[in-house]
Amino acid sequence: MKKILCFGDSNTFGYNPHNGSRYNENSRWTGILKNLCKNNYEIIEAGCNNRTAFSNNPDGIEFTGYMILPKYLKDFYDTIIFAIGINDLQKFYNPISEEFETGIEKLIKMIKESLPNCNIIILSPSHITENILNSNFRFMFNQTSIEKSKQITPIYEKIAKKYNCKLLDLNKIVTPSEIDGLHYEIEEHKKIAESIITLL
């Protein structure tokens, strides 16, 4: 059976913006994808709340993408869905555009070097909305984070083209919840899964 690794942050984990819980398997996009794939693919869920891609997260290895990714790359996957990067825009890290591009590219290179024949689908994250400034995450993200989030899709596009990856721009299919401007409602998770299945 073919294997798919879903590597990402809280939106891959299935964070529920209403109460901070985790959406159940039938509500988060990774679980919905599993159901859509039926018995054709084994789905490995590797999402983590507050996980950064390339910034050194003080919460440790599990929360720092480039540190934890090698653990997963010890196994073989036919496809890796790469859905991470928005947490690096937190005001504590505040990377400039060049640092962001170098950081994301570092992880894609790690995948390519470990699994050269693996298909990679990059999810370009939705822009953070102004609602985050009135949410529980207002201490982590600021106006600069919002503006930077609007500038990163071209970076993902450039990297996807350079490394022959497929790209799914989430800005074209889903919108973050009005509750926190960062995470997705159940209906949006369904749209993500349905869009990914067309790329497999």
Image (cartoon, rainbow, N blue to C red):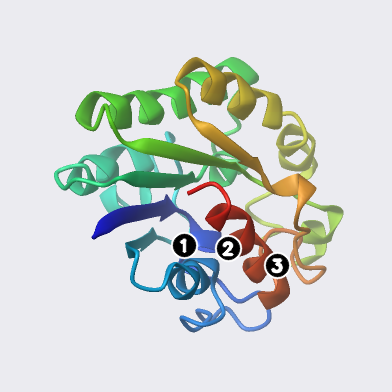
Would you identify the image quadrant in which residue 134 lies?
bottom right
Q: CA distance from mark 1 to mark 2?
A: 19 Å
Q: Which mark is residue 188?
A: 3
Q: Which residue is mark 2?
A: 193
On the image, numbered disc 1 is attached to which residue?
49
Using the image as rendered, state which of residue 155 and residue 182 is in the foreground.
155
Between 131 and 74, which is closer to the camera in this rendering?
Answer: 74
Amino acid type indicated by mark 1:
Asn
> Is residue 126 among what the camera can see?
no
Q: Nearer the viewer, mark 1 or mark 2?
A: 2
Q: Mark 1 and mark 3 in contact? Answer it, CB < 8 Å.
A: no
Quadrant in which the N terminus is drawn: bottom left
Q: Nearer the viewer, residue 110 or 199?
A: 199
The earlier-in-sequence mark between 1 and 3 is: 1
Q: Quadrant of residue 91?
A: top right
Q: Are marks 3 and 2 in contact (CB under 8 Å)?
A: no
The amino acid beneath tag 2 is Ala
Residue shown at the point (44%, 67%) measured from the top left: 37
Toward the left, the furthest residue is: 74
| First along the sequence among labels 3 and 2 | 3
Which residue is pictured at 69% across the width and 24% down the height? 154
Relative to 62, is 108 above or below? above
Towards the viewer: 188 or 106: 188
Circle 3: element type: helix
